[in-house]
Image (cartoon, coloured by chain):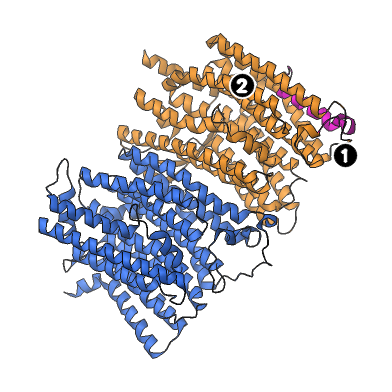
Chain colours: A blue, B orange
Amino acid sequence: MIASDLVALSPLIVLSSTAVVVMLSIAIRRDHHLAALLAFLGLAAALASLRFAAAASPRRVTGLLLVDGYSLFYSAVLLLSTAAVLLLAFAYMERQQEHREEFYCLMLLAACGALVLVSSCHLVSLFLGIEILSVSLYGLIAYLRFQPLPLEAGMKYLVLAATSSAFLLFGMALLYSETGSMELSSLAKSYMGTPDPALGAVGWAGTILMLTGIGFKLAVAPFHLWTPDVYQGAPLPVTAFVATVSKGSVFALLLRWFHGADSTVSAPVYWAFVTMAIASMLIGNLLALQQENVKRLLAYSSIAHMGYLLVAFLAAGPLGIQAATYYLIAYLVTMLGVFGLMTVLSTGEEEHCELKDYRGLFWQHPVISGLFAAMLLSLAGIPLTAGFLGKFYVIAAAASSSLWLPVFVLIVSSTIGIYYYLRVIVALFSLPAEAGEREEPVRLTVPLEASFSLAALVILLFVFGLYPTPFWALIQTMSASLG
Amino acid sequence: MILFWLVAILIAAGVLAGVAARWSDTAPRVICLGALATDFGLCLGLWSGHYPALATIGPPRWFAELSWNWIPQWGIRFHLAVDGLGLALILLTLFLGIMAVLASWRGIQRSAGFFHFNLLWVLAGVMGVFLAVDLFLFYFFWELMLVPMYFLIAVWGYERRIYAAIKFFLFTQISSLLMLAAIVALAVLHQSATGSYSFEYEDLLSMPLAPGTEMLLALGFLAAFAVKLPAFAIHTWLPDAHAEAPTAGSVILAGLLLKTGAFGMLRFVLPLFPNAARQLAPWMMTLGVIGILYGAVLAFAQTDLKRMVAYTSVSHMGFVLLGIFAMNDIALQGALIQMLSHGVSTGALFILAGALNERLHSRDLRSMGGLWDTMPVLSGAGLFFVMASAGMPGLGDFVGEFLVLTGTYRVSPVLAALGALGMIAGACYALRLVQTVFFGPNVHNWRFPDAHWYEWSVAAPMMACLLWIGLYPQPVLNVVRPAIDGIRHQIAVSTLAKR
C-alpha cells in the first residue's frame, strides 16, 4: 500500500477515525454537543477529502476497493445524506433520556459501511460493507432501548438481516465454487450475454441466493416484509437513515455490478429483476393505501420507489445508470425531507406519526405543512419537484429500452400511489372544524441546525425539479467512468 | 418575451397574493385582478397587433414565440408560441379568470391568500398549456394545473369535496401519465430516426410514423384529452368535481380545464397522428353524439343545480368532440366557437348557481322557485345565460352548435341528425331549469337582495361576450382560421402521402 492508495481511501480513513475519536471523547467526557459536533466535522472532513481522493482516482486499492468517479460521486451523495440526517437528529436526540453520544458513533460507522459498499468491486468488500452497515443499524434502530417499539424493530431487523446475510454469504460461496472468482466484474460476465451464459446449476443457485440477500437490503418485494415494522419502530432520524443511506448504497452497488459490463443481462436475471420491480411497485402502492401511520405508509411507498428504481436499472446502457442515479437522488432528497419534517413536527418525547396527528396542521403551521405537501407531491411525481423529473427520466430510459410492461405497471401503480399521498395531504389541509378536539395550537420551534438541513433539501427539491441541466451533466460524466 | 411574462406575472402574483393575505383580506383579490387585467391587456395588444395582417397577407405561423434552452441533454426547450387558436383560448382564460375572482369576492372568506394563490397558479398552468409547443413543457403545465385545482376543490368545496377532489385527481393523473408515456415514446422514436432527442412540436410533426405505432401513440394522447374533455364513459369525475367545487373552481373547471382537452386534440392529436385520427374519427364522433344526448338527458333529471349545469357541460362538450373529429373546415370552426361560448355561458351559469347558493345555502332545485319576484335582475341574467346554454339563436352557443352540425352533416348525416336532437333536449332542460328556479310560485317565501355590484360586473361582460359571438363571430373566426387551415393542411398532406 503506497501513499496514493491512502489518499484514494482518505474519505474512509477520515470517517472511521472520526468514529474512534467520538468514542474516545465519550470515554473522557459525555457531552452531546461535542459528540455531534465532532461527528459533523468528521463528515465534513470526509467530504472535503473526496477532492484529494478524486485526484488519485481512478485507482484500484488492494483488489477490494475501486475508487473511481462513480464511487466518489456516490460517496459524496451518501455523506451529504448522512450529514442531513445528523443535523435533523440532533434536536431529536437532545430530547431523549438515553445516553445520546454513541448514536453519532454508530451513524459514522454505518456511513463507513455505505462508503465501502459503493466503492467495492469484490465479494469480500461487498460483504464487509453490508455487515458494517447492518451491524451499526441494529444498534441505531434499537437505540431507544427502553421503549418497546424500537426494541421490537431492532430485534426484527437483527434476525432478518442476519438471515439475509447468511443467504448472501452462502450465495457467494456457491458462485465462487462455480466460477472461481470473487471479482464483481468477472462474476457479472457470467450473467451477461444471451441466450445462455456459461453458468451451471450451482452458479444459478448462488445467484438466486445473492439476489435474495440484496433484495432484502433494498426491501423490494417479495423481500420487503421487515420494512413497515422497522420503519415504524425505529427513531425517526434512523428511519430516515435506513430509507436513504442504507438503501441508496446497496442500490449503487447493484448498479455498478450489473451495469459495469457492456452487454445486457441474460434472460433469467432480467426476468428476476422485472418480477421484483413489478411486484414491488404493485405491493408497495397497494399496501400503503390503508395505512394510518405515516411511517408505515412511507415504508410501503419506499418499497414502491425501489420498484421504480429497478425499472430504471433495467434500462440498458448509460441512460439506465443516469436515470436510476437521478431518480435515486430525487428519492433521497424527498425522503430525507419528509422524515426531516416529521422529526421537526414531533415535539416532546413522543413521535407524531399517526395520520390523525397531522389533521388540520396547515392552518396552524402553513409553511411546514406546505413543504410537507410539496415533499409528498414529489414522491407522487408531480411537476415542479424533483420526483417528477425523476419519474420522467425513468420512463424515458425504460422507453428507450422498450420496457413497455414495466412502464405500464409504473403508470398504473403510481396512480394508485397518488391516492395515499393525497390522503396525507387531505389530512394536512382538513379544516379545523373537522379536525375535532385538538388542543390549543402547539408551539413549534424549528431548531436552527434542522432548519438549515431542511432548507437545503427544499431548495434541492425544486432545483432538481426545475433546472436539472448542470446536475444531469455531472451524472453523465460520472456514469462515463462506469463500464 | 411577452409570452414569458404572461405566465410569469400570474405565477409571481400568485405568490404575492399568498403573502399579502397576512395584511389584508382584500389585498389578494386586488393583486389577482391586477395581474389578470395586465395579462388581458397584453393579449389584447397581441390580438390587435396581428389582426390587420390576417385579412391581407398570409399571417406568420406564430404571432409570438419564445424559445430557451432548458434541458439540452433531452432536447427539451422552454418553447412558448401562440397562434390564433392559442390566442383565442388565452383570452378566454384571462376573461374567465377575472370573472372567477369577482364571483368569489364575498363567497370566499377562509384564507383568501391561499385561495387566490391556487387560482392564479391553475390559470398559469392553463395558459402554459395553451402556449407550450414543446411537448415536455406542455406536459409540465398540464400537470401543473392539477394540484392547485385539487386544492381549490378540496379546501373550499361543498360537502363531498374530498371525494370529488381525489376522484378528479386520479382520473386526470392516470390518463395524463399515459400521455407522458406517449410523449416520451415520440421523443425516443425521434432519437432513433435522427440521432437526437426532441420534444419540439415542429420536429415531431414532420416525423413519419408506422401505422400501428401511430395508433398506439394517438390513443395515449387521446386518453388524457378525452378524460379532460370529457368524452362519454370517462366523464364520471366531472359531475362530482363541478358540483363540489367552489364557484370559481367550477368556472375554471368548466370554462377552461375542459377546453384544454379539446385544445390538445386540435393542437396535437389531429396534426401529429392524422391517419390514426381519421381511423378513430367515426368512433370519436359517435362518442360525441352519445355524450350530447346522455348529458342532456341526465341534466334533465338532476335535482342539484350545479350537477345539472355539469351535465349540460357533458352535452356541450359532445358537440366539440363531434366537431373536432368531423375534421372539416366548418366543423372545426364550430368546435372552436363552441369552446369559447360554452366557456362563457357555462361559467356564467356556475356563477349564477354560486350566487343562488350564497343566498339560499342550497343547490337543490326543489327548494327554489318564484325567485323572479324577489330578485328580477339576477333572474333575468339567469334566463339569458340559460337560453344561451340551450342554444338560442343570436347567442354564442347557437353559432357553435350550428356550425358543428353543418360540418358533421357533410361527413355523416345520421350523426348530425342525432346530434341535432341534443339541441331539442337542451331546450327541455333549459326550460325546466328556468321554470323551477325563477318562475312558479314562491312557495318558500324567499326574500333576497338582488344582484350586488360584483355580480353585476360579472354578468354584464359575459352577456356582452355571448352576444358578440352570437351576432358577429367573424373576428374570432378570422383569428383562428390560419390555425385551423394548418391543422387541415396536416391532415391533407398525410392523405396524399398515403395515396
Query: Does residue B91 appear anywhere in the picture?
Result: no
Q: Position of residue A317 (x, y in %)?
A: 26, 46
Locate residue B159: give its quadrant: top right
Which residue does the image show at 75% across and 41% down from the upper left? Answer: B102
Q: Amino acid at mark 1?
A: Pro
> Under tag 1, what secondary structure?
loop
> Under tag 2, what secondary structure?
helix
Which residue does the image show at 61% across and 31% down from the upper left? Answer: B89
Q: Residues within 10 Å of mark 2 (few under 14, many from 20)?
A: many
Which residue does the image show at 43% across and 44% down from the upper left? Answer: A413
Disc 2: which residue: B292
Is B41 placed above or below B492 here?
Answer: below
Q: Which residues are magenta?
A: B368-394
Q: Position of residue B58 (x, y in %)?
A: 54, 21
Q: A241 or B439, which lies in front?
A: B439
Q: Position of residue A335 (x, y in %)?
A: 45, 59
Indicate which disc, 1 or 2, sits on the residue closer to the N terminus.
2
By secondary structure, the bulk of the magenta-drawn segment is best described as: helix
The chain containing the residue under callout 2 comes to B
Cα distance between the residues tagged 1 and 2: 36 Å
Marking on residue B449: 1
Residue B383 in the magenta stretch? The answer is: yes
Marking on residue A439: none
Which-is-in-front pick, marks 1 and 2? 2
Locate residue B229: give its quadrant: top right
The chain containing the residue under callout 1 comes to B
Q: Amino acid at mark 2?
A: Ile
Which residue does the image show at 20% across and 48% down from the upper left? Answer: A262
Q: Position of residue B107 (x, y in %)?
A: 76, 45
Query: Does residue A145 appear anywhere in the picture?
Result: yes
Residue B145 in the magenta stretch? The answer is: no
Q: Residues within 10 Å of mark 1 (few under 14, many from 20)?
A: few
